[in-house]
Image (cartoon, rainbow, N blue to C red):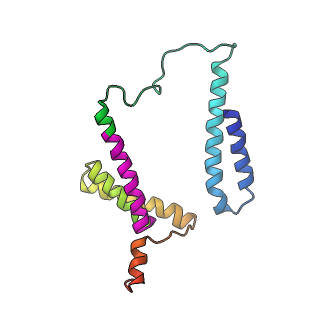
Amino acid sequence: MTLSFALISIGVIVQSLKWPFKTALFPVIIGGCALILSLAEFSMSLYETAGGKKKKKKQDAMDFKLSEGVDPAVARRRTWTAFGWIIGFFFLIVLFGFNIGIPLFVFLYVKCHGGEKWLISILMTVCSWIFFWGLFIWLLDTPMPEGWVFRWLQAIGIGS
C-alpha cells in the first residue's frame, strides 16, 4: 500500500512539473512530502519484517486511545465543541471571506477557547494573517472571494 502511494506521489510530482511555477508549487510540495513519508513507512515495514516474521515488541507511544480513562460525557462534549469550532470557521469564511475569516477565527479560538491573554491572542492573529497573506496572496497570487457580508453591503450601496 505504501509503495503504491509513493508511486502515486511520484506521478503527481512529475505531472505538476509541466505546469507554471506558482501552479505547480502546491502539488510538488504535497507530493514530495507524501513521497518521503510513504518511502519512510515502506522502509520501516521492510525493516520490521526482515527475517520473515514480525517481532512482537512493546506497544509504541503512538498506539494509545484518546478516550481511554475519559468519561464518555466529557468526550462527547469535547467532540461537539470541536465540531462547533469547525462549523464556526466555515461560517466565518462564508460570511467574511478568507482575508478576515481566518484571523478572526484564530483570535476567537485562541482567546475564547484557549483562554490566552490579549497580547498572545493578538500576536497569534497577526502571525496567522501574515502567513496566510504571504503564502496565498503575495507568493501564490490566489484570488480570494469576498464574503457574503461584503457582497450584501455592496448590493445596498455601502462600500466599493
Q: For the stretch drawn in magenta, what is the main secondary structure?
A: helix
Which image quadrant for residue 65?
Answer: top left
Q: Is residue 140 above or below residue 159?
A: above
Quarter of the image with the C terminus is bottom left
Horizontal arrangement in the rendering, residue 63 relative to residue 24 (left or right): left
| Most distant residue in the bottom direction | 157
Q: Is residue 95 above or below residue 62?
A: below
Quarter of the image with the N terminus is top right
As for residue 88 lying within the magenta part, the answer is yes
Horizontal arrangement in the rendering, residue 16 relative to residue 125 (left or right): right
- Give x and y (percent) for residue 85: 36, 51
Question: For the point 52% across and 67% down, which residue is it?
Answer: 137
Which image quadrant for residue 21?
Answer: bottom right
Magenta segment boundaries in residue numbering: 77-98
Between 14 and 158, the residue placed more toward the observer is 158
- Give x and y (percent) for residue 151: 43, 77
Q: Is residue 66 above or below residue 128?
A: above
Between 113 and 29, the residue placed more toward the observer is 113
Question: For the point 66% across and 33% down, which residue is it?
Answer: 2
As for residue 23 lying within the magenta part, the answer is no
